[in-house]
Image: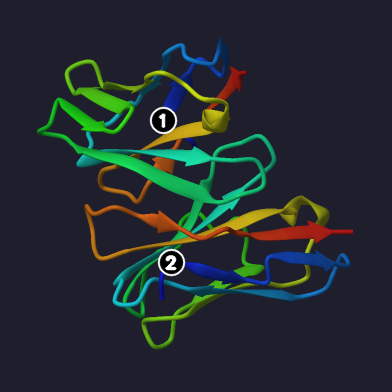
Amino acid sequence: SQQGEEDPQALSIQEGENATMNCSYKTSINNLQWYRQNSGRGLVHLILIRSNEREKHSGRLRVTLDTSKKSSSLLITASRAADTASYFCARTGNTPLVFGKGTRLSVIA
Amino acid sequence: GAGVSQSPRYKVAKRGQDVALRCDPISGHVSLFWYQQALGQGPEFLTYFQNEAQLDKSGLPSDRFFAERPEGSVSTLKIQRTQQEDSAVYLCASSVGQGNTIYFGEGSWLTVV
């Protein structure tokens, strides 16, 4: 079963805008990882954030983690058409990576 | 190798046929995972190895599914007597160890007709 839930399920924005995706989970975590998946391709790792961290940055990506609310968010700034993909969060706790259904992001040029 | 490598990339099997999917993890990675991804869904966990030991196979959907990693490197996922509901992308991933970044391959696309 999928215990991570991304929100929204789909998001459509104009190029240059920021995109924010949220992820909630139900049980305790060791870390949380965000992935991108282009249509027909494998998963590309974006950022790993550990349970004792609150925020991490990588280029145009910013991930926050609130363990008290059991939630995380992924912010993509200054989006580009090439950012069009599905984005997944996955948590690691006592079990291997558990994924949600993902957010399908469409960036319109 | 440079990344996780999976083969075949695409497989069409007739219902009832056995298939074998291969995964070459990143060199030196201790942990290896198999996931199944249906169209429009997130990946679902199948099984997990640490070296040659299969530590968790709770996600395997039936006894027709079998995975092995005999020498702690290459892994094979075997599906016996394939059914149409087995059609999915099978993703392999590896990691240096627990709690570290998990890297995925491009997947093996299985279509059962």
Q: Nearer the viewer, mark 2 or mark 1?
A: 2
Three-letter amino acid code at disc 2?
Gly
- Residue holding disc 1: A4
Tell me the element at label 2. Answer: loop
Q: Which residue is drawn at 46% across and 11% down?
A: A17
Contact check, label 2 and label 1, Cβ < 8 Å: no
Are both tags, 2 and 1, on one chain?
no
Q: What element carries label 1?
A: loop
Give above or below for B58 relative to A1: below
What is the spatial separation of the Cα atoms under label 2 and label 1, in whole angstroms? 26 Å
| Residue linked to disc 2 | B3
Q: Mark 1 lies on which chain?
A: A
* For residue A17, above or below residue B85: above
B102 over B17 or under it: above or below: above
Place residue B19 in its image quadrant: bottom right
Q: Residues within 10 Å of mark 1 (few under 14, many from 20)?
A: many
